[in-house]
Amino acid sequence: MKEAKAKILLVDDEPDILEIVGYNLKNEGYKVYTAENGEEGLKKAKKKKPDLIILDVMMPVMDGIEACEKMRKVKDLDNTVITFLTARGEDYSMIAGFDTGADDYITKPIKPRVLVSKVKSLLRRKKNPEQKSGNILKLGDLTIDKDQYKIIYKGDEMVLPRKEFELLALLTSKPGKVFTREEILDVVWGIEVVVGGRTIDVHIRKLREKLGDRSFKTVKGVGYKYVK
């Protein structure tokens, strides 16, 4: 058994998932904790302070969406990466998950080796969450503070979910430049992350709702760009 590299909390109401996923993660040397519902997961998260939390969406007692929302209010979990592992791929579930502060979304079933690769990628984010530059970027009514992971839009301060922030930071880094879907997935989600192109669309939709539709332009068949 390899030396434990990180602590992972796996929250799912399916015993088979806890057993199979837990087994594969332990084989990689991770310290794995499990919980069978959101309420139990929240208690263990506060106690164990894991590096990564993998949450199912549909669970008894407290579902994953509510659990994620409560976890994001726990200061000790500020730097914990949270991802959903669920068979549900509907847009509304994805949007709800990102709105509550989830960092990513994994659709099951997923092959164990792919899941392990995904976990490694997620944990690298914790070590290097944003490669913070210390710069404050100002574009018209929008100010982006990369050090504090927050934005100010038309005088109002906002704290965006991590992936929305990283996507916004990428697009605004070169206003007018068209970023391809491949570039966006590579920079924001990482080359080993298994997500569909619709994940980008969901995040763009949420940014448009919060910052206005006119700033984000779709280039059909290519990708997206930010215009001042």
Image: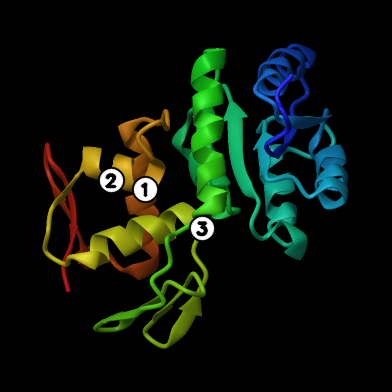
> Residue flagged by tag 3: what amino acid is it?
Pro
Can you say which quadrant of the picture contains the C terminus? bottom left
> Residue flagged by tag 1: what amino acid is it?
Val
Where is residue 138 shown, x and y percent of the image?
29, 82
Q: Is residue 8 above or below residue 98?
A: above
The nearer-to-camera label among 3 and 1 is: 1
The residue that mark 3 highlights is 161
The answer to whether mark 3 and mark 1 are in CB contact below 8 A is: no
Left or right of 79 on screen, residue 225? left
SS at mark 3 in the image? loop
How packed is label 1: few (under 14 Cα within 10 Å), some, or many (20 or more)? many
Q: Earlier in the sequence, mark 3 or mark 1?
A: 3
Alpha carbon separation for disc pair 3 and 1: 13 Å
Residue at (73%, 30%) from the top-left corner? 3
Residue at (36%, 60%) from the top-left corner? 207
Can you say which quadrant of the picture contains the N terminus? top right
Left or right of 172 on screen, residue 218? left
The answer to whether mark 1 and mark 2 are in CB contact below 8 A is: yes
| Colour approach in the figure | rainbow
Left or right of 215 on screen, residue 110? right
Q: Which of 126 and 78 is in front in this view?
A: 126
Q: Is residue 91 above or below residue 108?
A: below
The residue that mark 1 highlights is 188
The residue that mark 2 highlights is 184
How packed is label 2: few (under 14 Cα within 10 Å), some, or many (20 or more)? many
**Residue 208 visible in the shown view:** no
SS at mark 2 in the image? helix
Q: Quadrant of residue 60?
A: top right
